[in-house]
Image (cartoon, rainbow, N blue to C red):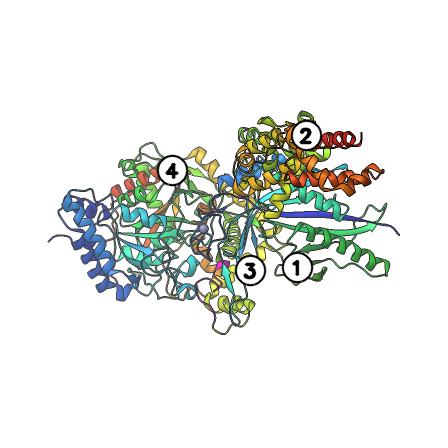
Amino acid sequence: MTTPLYKKTAREIRDAVRSGAVTATAVTEAHLARIAEVDPKVDAFTQIWTDEALAQAAAVDAKVKQGVDPGPMAGVPVGVKELICTRTGKTTCASKILENFRSPYDATIIKKLDAAGAIFLGKVNMDEFAMGSSTERSTLKTTKNPWNLKCVPGGSSGGSAAAISADECAMAIGSDTGGSIRQPAALCGCVGIKPTYGRVSRYGLVAFASSLDQIGPLTKNVEDAALSLNTLCGRDPLDATSADLPVPDFTKALTGDVKGLRVGLPKEYFTEALNAEMREKVEAAVDVFRRGGAEIVPVSLPHTDYAIATYYIICTAEASANLARFDGVRYGYRHPGAKTVEEMYVLSKSEAFGPEVRRRIMLGTYVLSSGYYDAYYLKAQKVRRLIKKDFDDAFEQCDFVMGPTSPIPSFEFGAKTENPLEMYLADIYTISVNLATLPGISIPCGLTASGLPAGLQMIGRPFGEETLLRAAHCYEQTSGITLGEPPIA
Amino acid sequence: MEFEAVVGMEVHVEINSKSKVFCGCSGNFHAAPNTNVCPVCLGMPGVLPVLNVDMVNKSVAVGLALNCTISRWSKLDRKNYFYPDMAKNYQISQYDLPLCQNGWIDIEVDGQTKRIGITRAHIEEDTARNTHTIGGNQSGVDFNRSGLPLLEIVTEPDIRSAKEALAYLTALKQMLQYLDVSDCNMEEGSLRAEANISVRPVGQEKFGTKTEVKNVASFSGVHKAIEFEIARHIKLINSGGKVVQETRGWDADRGITVPQRLKESAHDYRYFPEPDLVPIVVDEAWEQRIRESLPELPAARRSRMGTQYGLSAYDANVITLSQDTANYYEQVVAAGADAKKAANWLMVELQSLLSAAKQDIRDCRVSPADLAALVGLIESGAINGKMGKDVIAEMFETGKATQDIVNEQGLSQITDTGEIEAIIRQVLADNPAQVEQFRSGKDKVFGFLVGQVMRATQGKANPALLNDLLRRELSRQEN
Ligand SMILES: [Zn+2]
């Protein structure tokens, strides 16, 4: 029996389409059928662009027929997070305030993927404005974890992770401000990489926290992550913070060995906050690296404890300004009962932003207000530099840092929505990476006894994605761990 | 009690960059509403600003011309406040690290030179423009102006009178026009001036309570508004009252300032560094490159031209007021005209034609070479001064060359002695009574006779020659 097309990896699809062994149309149809079959249960997709996807596929097939190179992502079906601006469909950010918003332009990465031959199947769910770790903060729908439909997919890119895990697409675009790619990837058992800040253009990514946000791919395996980065990365004249560095062929970094690599294990990541089962999985992964000839080095990241407080000051401060534009003046929700300009602001925002978004806007406004700026925002910026320095110091002794992605596996709906602080702890291992502007990858490292995926995180030097991909790929190839198929039940 | 005024100026200058400061839209805001807009200057979701390098270059040029220190490292910040003319509900500006700092400019008041300190000059984006006149209770916003490049120039509180404020604005405008970075049109809003005004007893160190005056649309308005405000402060204090710190608007129709209820009043702007932009790093080489590209600045040009052309301080001042006039003048002289006469013809005749036609010298149809030719014809006696005025008016109107007009209209003076003598004899014969009066000692009649001859020659007789011949003929007939 041959593998169904929807089970194939992005690289397999690309190769098959390029060689003419299979058409992009067939691939697209197979995935659309798969979505029709499983998405009623998973609820990852918020919009399905059947006609547009088939038209894109037809264009790819026409190129193949004419002998024109259809591109490095030819025929690869992609799900796009709801906060990436696309001319096609809506860009809602999973919020009532943008429930009918259509972007007049395509994000830079959308243009790049389109040029590379990728097929956009539609948009996938997320926490409202990427603020959350469970995708429960979406106003669109409730996305489930394919490994257990009673459990959350993680967040904020929960739709992206669930869609990959349920084989609804071969690559999904996510964004990561404090772990929003890596944590859902870990909870849903797929691969997610947050590139170094500046690696991927943010133009067209609706900003949550500008100095932390970064776009990245969620994929079925490490090779697909490398392949996707080849298209996504690179300097963009429309993003002043994008790095003017050459983009390597990331797939060439996948050598299959880790001999001589130094793996740093930060002692601060292995405390009682770490669930025992998760610790066991990570320790087993350490053994895989040791057996592979890597050197295991104990390191310390002494300011880890301050990361969450620092993060929630900086990200909320930036968010309070970034979200100010949603005022009902030019686009988006405008309260029908508003009689004055001030009422238009207050009523529209109060009604159309969800509670977590409102909480963060207020927090951010507070930490920037006169008299509190120095104590909060300025102090947080100083601590941010110390956190970055912790990593600089660690990288003197190791080539990458390794640990768990999340302290806990997925949890049931509603378990953490009552207490926002508890939800914030889900990102305890991932947010430092954004604060330090480093690349981080999460890959599956086994299933818990209750059948939920565990994620292994690797954190690299600035622009050290190749090392991460090499290590992650080698682990994937040599650990003998395969999660198998999620039950979607 | 005697008071002195303390005034500081904040001037916003729209820099004439081809595109807006953070996007590629055209800087022309005269277009139909909302046509020079894009996702960036509309504040659409997901957009990012990219700093226009031309704006940085021009801002550095202004900073250097104003003797400022150019920051090696400066940054942009977000200034947060809500208003429908703000696309993002924050304005990208520079807060604690402006691009240019600690400069000065010399101004001239009543023949005295005074130095005004420049605190800072920083880059920011303009807001959109709200219109509240659309029928009923609707308002419109035109985003053509949103994101236009602004340079805000702030002085030290060194200005002591409305006159000095006006002199400062004049000098600043002249400087900006020399640098060709703005058209500085206050009526159109490409230059906006606000004044911070306070008064204090003479001899007192401490500043009085200040008020800020906005909403002034002309240079003369600034002068009047400051004068009014100073008088208001003094009157208030003298009558036992207190000046309230507030923002006031200038009501040009009534000639008074009135308290303004402002959108930003008592606002906490919650400034923080703009994370979407990288710091502005102007290294020494960059600064040097711009320094070398600076044109000759007003003060230098004034003094050079004064010496080189032997102009009075007043003339040098007037001619160098605008770079275009100064260039024009130098071209006239280069074409061979006498420097002093050229100055007169330019400042008096041509200037009055330009003012009457509300025309810029740049668009003037009288070429410098033609003006030089005209000055030459008068000097050689080929035409007289009065004819010259007619010729320049004709040149101004039609753009024809000097000699062509002179030829066409037969304007050359009559210098033929015989021809003039014949006319004189005729005039004397026609006016026996006046000739009699002259002989009986009434010298004034001489002028009447000159006029009659001029009329008969249609003004073409050479005046000196005519005088000579008329006296000779009168004395000849007497004998
Ligand atoms: Zn624009």
Camera-nearest residue between B272 and A12: B272
Give me the disc on residue B82: 3
In the rendered view of the protein, which quadrant contains the C terminus of chain A? bottom left
Dots 4, 1 in contact, CB < 8 A: no
Q: Residues within 10 Å of mark 2 (few under 14, many from 20)?
A: some
Bounds of the magenta segment: A324-335
Residue A327 in the magenta stretch? The answer is yes
* Distance from Cα at disc 4 to Cα at disc 1: 48 Å
Q: From the viewer's perspective, tell me whether residue B330 is left or right of residue A1.
A: right
Q: Secondary structure at mark 4?
A: loop
Q: List the residue tagged with mark 4.
A: A464
Q: Are marks 2 and 3 on the same chain?
A: yes
Mark nearer the viewer, 2 or 3: 2
Relative height, residue B465 to residue B11 (above, below): above
Image quadrant in which you'd find residue A468:
top left
Residue A426 drawn at (x, y percent): 43, 55
Q: List the residue tagged with mark 1.
A: B266
Residue B78 drawn at (x, y percent): 55, 50
Q: Secondary structure at mark 3?
A: loop
* Distance from Cα at disc 3 to Cα at disc 4: 41 Å
Q: Which numbered disc, 2 or 1, marks the residue that appears first in the sequence?
A: 1
The disc labelled 4 sits on which kind of residue? Gly
Dots 1, 3 in contact, CB < 8 A: no
Camera-nearest residue between A159 and A70: A70
* Distance from Cα at disc 2 to Cα at disc 1: 57 Å
Q: List the residue tagged with mark 2.
A: B340
Mark nearer the viewer, 2 or 1: 2
Q: Residues within 10 Å of mark 3 (few under 14, many from 20)?
A: many
Residue for point 38% across, 37% down = A464
